[in-house]
Image (tube, helix red, strand yellow):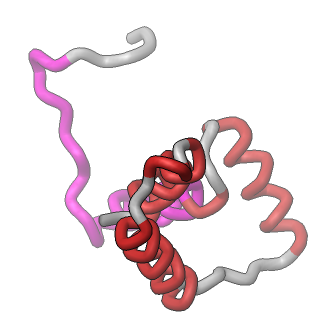
Amino acid sequence: MNSHDTATLLEDAADRIADISRPDLQIMLRRAALRLRNAGDISVGDDVEEALRDLAGEFGLSRNDTIRFIVREWLEKNTYLPVHELDEDGDVDGEA
């Protein structure tokens, strides 16, 4: 389960707190605590932080998702990861 799934479960539980059983709530809270405990924060300079904020707003992503996107793109462009190839028959967004 990734952090997005955990956050969604917690938000859903908060919306219907009266309907969530105590054991289910305990499990969700323990998962969230474990994720927070194991989460590493990336510290960057103010100029990089500002650029990340602007880019995240442009992409409509969170700061961490933007960092993941940037790292994946860099790894693909520098051949550390295989590039995602589009199917010839697949749909694409935008214009050619």
Is 28 in front, or is 34? 28
Q: Residue at x 53, y 50 (%)?
A: 18
Left or right of 21 on screen, residue 67: right
Is 56 in front, or is 71? 56
Specify the quadrant of the image occupied by residue 20: bottom left
In the rendered structure, does residue 73 fall within the stretch colored magenta? yes
Vertically, is 91 above or below 61? above
Q: Residue furthest bottom?
A: 37
Is 66 in front, or is 40? 40
Where, quadrant-wise, is the N terminus in this rendering? bottom left
Instruction: Give the extent of the magenta segment.
Output: 65-90
Residue 45 spot, x, y in % from top left? 84, 78
Is 8 in front, or is 72? 8
In the rendered structure, does residue 70 fall within the stretch colored magenta? yes
Residue 1 visible, this angle: yes
Where, quadrant-wise, is the C terminus in this rendering? top left
Residue 72 visible, this angle: no
Q: Residue furthest top?
A: 95
Vertically, is 1 above or below 14? below
Left or right of 88 on screen, residue 16: right
Q: Residue at x 44, y 75 (%)?
A: 26
Q: How many numbered discs, if any?
A: 0
Residue 60 spot, x, y in % from top left? 63, 37
Q: Residue furthest right?
A: 46
Q: Residue at x 66, y 58 (%)?
A: 63
Residue 54 spot, x, y in % from top left? 79, 47
Left or right of 84 on screen, residue 35: right
